[in-house]
Image (cartoon, coloured by chain):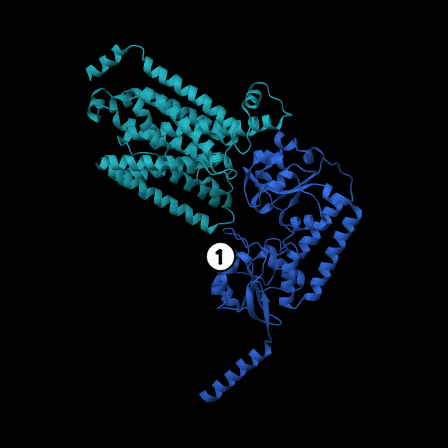
Amino acid sequence: MRSTVETHRMSGFPVARVTGVVLLLLALVIAAFLHLSLGAKEIDWMTVWHALFDYNTADMDQVIIRESRQARLIVSVVVGASLALAGVMMQAISSNPLADPGLLGINSGAAFFVVASLLFFPMFGQGYVPVFAFLGAAFAALLVMMLSGWEQGSERLVLAGVVVTALFSAMTAILLLIDQQGLEKVRHWLTGAIGASDLKKLHWVYPYLICAMVGCFALVRSLNAFHLGERVAASLGVNVLLLKVSGLALVVVLSGCVVTVAGPIGFVGLVVPHVARLLVRNSYAWLFIYSLLIGTLLLILSDIAARVVLSPYEINTGIITAFVGSPVFIALVLGRMK
Amino acid sequence: MFKQLAVVCVGLVGLSLQAKEVQTFENEYGKVEVPVAPECVVSLHDFSLTIQLFELGVQPCGSVARKRLWSDPIFRGVQHRFNTEGLTYVGSHKSPDEEAIAVLEPDLIVGLSFQSKFKAKLDQIAPVVILPTKKKTIKEWARQLAELTGKSDRFEDQQKEYDWIISEFKRLVPEPEKITVTTLEIYEDNFQLIGRGGLDEVIADMGLGRPQGYLDAKQGINYSLERISDMDADIIIDTYEPMLDSREDTEDFRNSAQWKNLFAVKNDQFLYLNRSRYGDSMGGLIGSAYLLLSHVAERDFKKQ
């Protein structure tokens, strides 16, 4: 432990890591410009520039950028960052590289509760959607934890997640079946639809999101200690149970917010922490920063792909992230089996 | 005693069969033996067939409808125009309830082109006639339905009224092709080019033009709202569905600069109609034709 701490102190200013962050930010800016210029209608970069810094409401292309694509970009950024942080936190507190809010049924639980609330409690306004999403995410998380047991072996945790995901997906399917007419528009949202989202939905959840993101960074010291093992963490004064509970609560809030805004989008929380760990290993502060940037980048690129790959058809962003994430998940499982 | 009863029963069955005179109906989907005067017709589509049956003066005994949990079925486009008492709900148009249909003991079942897949099963209950709603116009398949139910006279009246509206329109608007019309449905994050209630058929019959963006695009595709300016026209017609709160769901877009900058919107030439007001029926054609006659031929408006 002492040697690790000394190594950190001696390293001084982390040039490589800061450079990495700058490069990622640069990539993000380019991706954001691409996001604003590509889509159902091709718009040149100069128009994008004018729309951002010299807005003319009479120019229809500039209006599209300001009224439609800008909002979509902001939603992509927030969703990507939230899912990435949730993934890092989930993997950290479960000490399991396969943990992800999507794979562990948390997103499915949130989605089921939202769909059920629309069906059974239509009297509650849409402002209550985040509440039901949080309840569903929390219920699913507790269910997975109970099924996987206190020790939470990797395989058992993933199996429990698969079971809970299947359970909530089946229950959602039943609801859709018994009220086909009323829940028609929910089908689209259930596969992760950034396009169907808007700033209004983001407005419902941003206070919770900000708190949860700050909360993640507040737990960095404890997570760094926990990374060395539960006993070491306890000996360093970390309340392991409190850490796990608060970490899980943060995952629930982050996932619930994402489901509220854009529906259940899977695999981002799985893929991003692994990519980030290729660049940074020891510090959760850096892991959070890198994951946040990579998650944002991944979501922006996925949303671009969703709009241009099958143009003029537009596919849901959640389908693209599943295409990206599934091979990574298979590779991780095969790697563990070896 | 049993022998006598059996003879009486066979006799009664024979009499009832004799009473039901049958005819052979033939269309694109083959030949079907159907009763000349069907007493219990089941419709597999509320928004087109059920409405057209009522318009012809035939009260169907069963029809598919739209059903939400814990609410009564809604026969879309039907119940605000006709008395639906005695009309039994028989499932949805995507999955008709075979048992509910069988209980009615119908002597004729009518369906749409896409429902030909149900024919084999439903044929065991009653003769099934599929009408070519996909390839033929409303006028053409409605004529077939009228022949099938023995109501050709009523159909001819409808056809006559419709033809008059079209001829009146053409008399008042000498160059209709120079007026462009876009029919669409705007949803929360996309739109489709579609004109229900026979609107597209009426526009074609009136000879009205379409904007280039509309001609280049395809029907049945959900386009991004970013493409809306490509569809700008002299007149834009959108519809809202009260059952689905679509008016409220799309309000933000209609308040956007993207929408307000459209020529048709700027010049108050945007028509926002109830999607279920007129069905895909002859009555729908007539209603839509009167609407266009009033909004295009009987008022001043600007061209792009």
Count of marks, rendered view: 1
**Residue kind at label 1, given as amino acid type:** Ser
Q: Where is residue B158 in the image (x, y as percent from the top left)?
A: 71, 59
The C terminus of chain A, quarter of image: top left
In which quadrant of the rendered view does residue A283 lie? top left
Chain seen in blue? B
In which quadrant of the rendered view does residue A247 lie? top left
The shade of chain A is cyan
Residue sitting at x 59%, y 53%: B76
Image height check: is B127 above or below A304? Answer: below
Residue sitting at x 67%, y 53%: B284
Q: Where is residue A65 in the image (x, y as percent from the top left)?
A: 56, 27
Residue A176 horizontal side relative to residue B170, left or right: left
Image height check: is A44 above or below B126? Answer: above
Q: Can residue B177 be seen in this view?
A: yes
Residue sitting at x 59%, y 39%: B248
Q: Is residue B187 visible?
A: no
SS of the residue under disc 1 = loop
Residue receiving disc 1: B95
Residue furthest to the right in view is B171
Query: How dense is the environment of label 1, judged by Cα within 10 Å: few (below 14), some, or many (20 and up)?
Result: few
Image height check: is A208 above or below B241? Answer: above
The N terminus of chain A, quarter of image: top left
Residue A131 horizontal side relative to residue B157, left or right: left
